[in-house]
Amino acid sequence: MKLHQLRDRPGATHRPKRVGRGPGSGKGKTGGRGMNGQKSRSGVALGAFEGGQMPIYMRLPKRGFNNPAAKRFAVVNLGKLQQFIDSGKIDADKLIDEAAMLAGGLVRRRLDGIRILSKGTLTAKTDIVASGASKSAIAAVEAAGGSLKIESDVPLPDDNGANGA
């Protein structure tokens, strides 16, 4: 069988009912919309309107708070990092920073930064730089003989006073 020979099974597709095409069509005159009223007109979007009754989105209690300024981090577990080191996608001898994690495919996107968590075990001695890390992740990396620095702790290269200081 070839692609151009593929067909739907007989009866699988139906032509759409054409509305407003005379009384013999079964959907003539009002086109299935009944007589007068708001819903018989075009351009009506009633959405959550419940006709005088208190709408459900107003009846239900509201709780909590969604912080619009909250930061979302891409999460990397130490066990997953060790898998990528073992498979050769990330080089443990070089500094593992956020760019290396992106290039190695460990994280898909950086979001507001990359945060290292301690799920799993890390056996390779590595130097890691990330936007954030849990205390247990820092302890696990140091126990393996490496170091984990938070990005704010890393000194930035000298910009020769370009920041106005």
Image: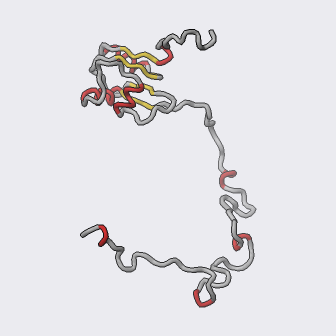
Occupied quadrant, residue 8: bottom left
Q: Is residue 59 left or right of residue 11?
A: right
At 35% across and 16% down in the image, what residue appears?
127
> Picture coordinates of residue 118 (x, y %)?
37, 24
Asked if 112 appears above or below 63 in the picture, the reply is: above
Residue 24, percent from left and from top: 59, 90
- The number of numbered badges drawn on the structure is 0
> Measured from the top left, where is residue 43 in percent x and y?
69, 66
Q: Is residue 13 above or below residue 154?
A: below
Residue placed furthest toward the bottom: 24
Q: Quadrant of the C terminus?
A: top right
Q: Residue 109 falls in which quadrant of the image?
A: top left
Q: Is residue 17 left or right of residue 84?
A: right
Color style of the picture = secondary structure
Closer to the camera, 97 or 69? 97
* Residue at screen point 67% across, 63% down: 45
Closer-to-camera residue (57/129):
129
The residue shown at (43%, 18%) is 135
**Residue 139 in the image, given as x and y percentages of width and height:** 37, 16
Quadrant (top left, top right, bottom left, bottom right) of the N terminus:
bottom left
Q: Is residue 61 above or below residue 157?
A: below
What residue is shown at x 60% (from left), y 80% (from top)? Answer: 19
